[in-house]
Image (cartoon, rainbow, N blue to C red):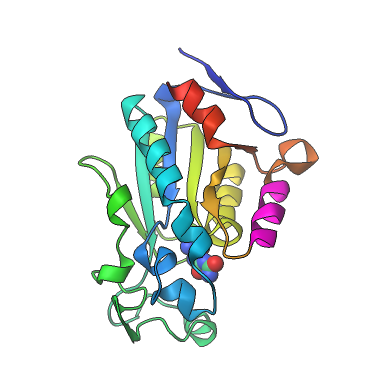
Amino acid sequence: MTVLSVNAKPFQFDFDPEHTALLIIDMQRDFCYKGGFGESLGNDVTPTNAIIPTVEKILLAARRAGLFVIHTREGHRPDLSDCPPAKLRRSPSIGTEGPMGRILIRGEYGHDIVDELKPAEGEPVIDKPGKDAFYMTDLELILNNRGIRSLIVCGVTTHVCVHTTIRAANDRGFECLMMEDGTAAFDPADQEAAIRMINQQGGIFGWTAVSEDLLRVLG
Ligand code: TIU
């Protein structure tokens, strides 16, 4: 067993690469580009777009280090049969036509992952109808089958799908490291609060770290 140790908050994050996955949450055009779901909700996508190069560096380093890599996408069936009416009422742009196709609909250009982070052969892509990547998906089964115990988490948005998923992972016994500069919220105030909510109270949901410290350890 190898143990790698990253400078993190609230203390060192130790992980065995054999039992660790890089989980990249919802790095879809719908959240990172103009004309997508994120912008339709009234957000500026500059912060979510800006982390693409950092997440790419982490992804390439994780692949070189032999970490299991897994990607998620939030979205719905074209007939919206898997979209709760309560969700649609508060996010009415879902399913409407935009410049990247129908918003948050599987198979549309905007729903897919940005080119820089395109999943490689053998890297599972989890399509999820909600914010929590465990809800109504086979993520937990896939992680358990691979013996994964630790998750290094990147993606968007920090306070919504990243947080919901880390909280759900924490309750399932996974140790989660959230990358401070490999995640983004639309509003920097939400980003700052979301980071603090993970590492506060002795690491109530997990750890946070910056990419420079992770990349040094991954080599
Ligand atoms: N709205 C928002 O900040 N996020 C989402 O709706 N989904 C994800 O975070 N992926």
x%, y% of residue 91? 50, 81
Which residue appears at 47% of the width and 72% of the height?
38
**Residue 205: x and y, percent?**
66, 43
Relative to 167, 211 lies left or right: left
Residue 180, picture quadrant: top right
Q: Residue furthest right?
A: 201
- Name the residue at 69% across, 53% down: 192
Measured along the vertical axis of the image, is residue 21 above or below residue 140?
A: above
Q: Which residues are magenta?
A: 188-197
**Percent coordinates x, y for residue 140 in the rendering:** 43, 45
Q: Is residue 6 above or below residue 78?
A: above
- Residue drawn at x 70%, y 60% as measured from the top left: 189
Relative image position of residue 179 (x, y in whole percent): 55, 41
Q: Is residue 195 above or below residue 99?
A: above
In-image side of 98 versus 184 (left or right): left
Q: Nearer the viewer, residue 128 or 160?
A: 160
Residue appearing at x 50%, y 23% in the figure:
216
Q: Quadrant of the N terminus?
A: top left
Asked if residue 175 can be seen in this view, the reply is no
Residue 17 part of the magenta segment: no
- Quadrant location of the C terminus? top left
